[in-house]
Amino acid sequence: MADEQDESSKTEEASERKLERAREEGNVPLSMEVKSWFMLFAALMMLWGLAPFVMERTTAIAFKFIERPAELPVDPLGLRDLLKETSFDLFLTLLMPLGLFLVLAAASALIQIGFLYAPKRMEIKWERINLFANAKEFITKAKIVDLIKGIFKITAVGYAAWLIVKPRILDILNTSSFDVASILALTYKLLLLILLTMVMIIFVIAFADYFYQKFSYLKRQRMTKQEVKDEYKQTEGDPQVKMRLRSIRMERLRKRMMANVPKSSVVVTNPTHFAVALRYEPEEGMEAPIVVAKGQDFIALKIREIAQQNDVPIVENPPLARALFASVEIDEPIPTEHYAAVAEVIKYVYQLKGKTLPQREEN
């Protein structure tokens, strides 16, 4: 009952931070049906494409034992060399099909969860081995779903195999009159058809199970409202997180400021330690100049460089530059106490450009 209440209280979607922690612990959605399908597909490829090659190579290896048994060495050194040579030949013969199984087994995991290194998952936890402690987990919703899937798979595959074998029952019963080659050909054909059918059936089951496992995983990872609040407090309170967020904000602000400098009307400098870019376009209905960029030392140097590259006037006024830098934030209009000093700078810039300030700005 307590577990049901706990599940019902988890109404919030899992945060990225919680999903990352779960992944670090090796807790990821993984469908065993997908892995089973890859293994069946590998078996099909081996039976269809590699079986003739493997049989041919195995026959060639065994042929020397059958064709000329009297010529085989019987001394210890000769038998040792023969065993080594035969074992090596068999290893090379089976290397390709075994490699196919290993590659597809790895692919089944990589496709679902990508590359994952989770040492915590490999730690030995004795509570997992304690049967009495885990007795309540023997019958769970997941176990019941797995049981239903198993019954469905056995039924579907068995019925499909019967549909394949049924038209060929007479051939199977009459195999006593066939030669060895015909029996092997019939067996190979039946196995290939049954395996192909199994691959198609398990593909449908694996496809559905993949999304079911992902849905179940995200549902298990849901959080309560209190967990969301606690995680938010922890994240906001983490000094490293705060430093990173502040660094990101400063970098974005710097890029935005540098993009605004070419659009500014004038840059007021210290001349070297401070630089403040102002934009004033009374034709656009601006009531007062706005600070679009400001910086100190290196940033001030970059503002001046961009201003020079874009023919933005640069006016040296150390007291005004220091005052604007200290008292005005980005994208804010200048305060009234600086109107007179800024008006002189704007008037000077208009004179450089051969323009005249609107009359309302003179008053």
Image (cartoon, helix red, strand yellow):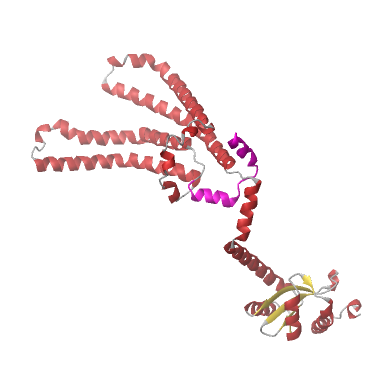
Q: Nearer the viewer, residue 16 or 191?
A: 16
Q: Quadrant of the N terminus?
A: top right
Residue 240 lies, in percent from the top left, at 57, 63
Q: Which residues are magenta?
A: 1-26
Q: Quadrant of the C terminus?
A: bottom right
Q: Nearer the viewer, residue 20 or 173?
A: 20
Residue 178 lies, in percent from the top left, at 28, 17
Up-down: is 229 above or below 194? below
- Answer left or right for 266 relative to 64: right
Residue 165 falls in which quadrant of the image? top left
Residue 317 in view, yes or no = no
Magenta-drawn stretch contains 265: no
- Answer left or right for 232 relative to 49: right
Up-down: is 357 above or below 43? below
Residue 203 lies, in percent from the top left, at 49, 33
Residue under the point 86% across and 69% down: 285
Magenta-drawn stretch contains 6: yes
- Answer left or right for 183 relative to 154: left
Residue under the point 38% across and 34% down: 43
Residue 67 in view, yes or no = yes
Residue 334 falls in which quadrant of the image? bottom right
Q: Nearer the viewer, residue 230 or 217?
A: 230
Up-down: is 192 above or below 172? below
Residue under the point 23% across and 33% down: 59
Q: Nearer the viewer, residue 198 or 116?
A: 116
> What type of secondary structure mainly makes up the magenta span?
helix
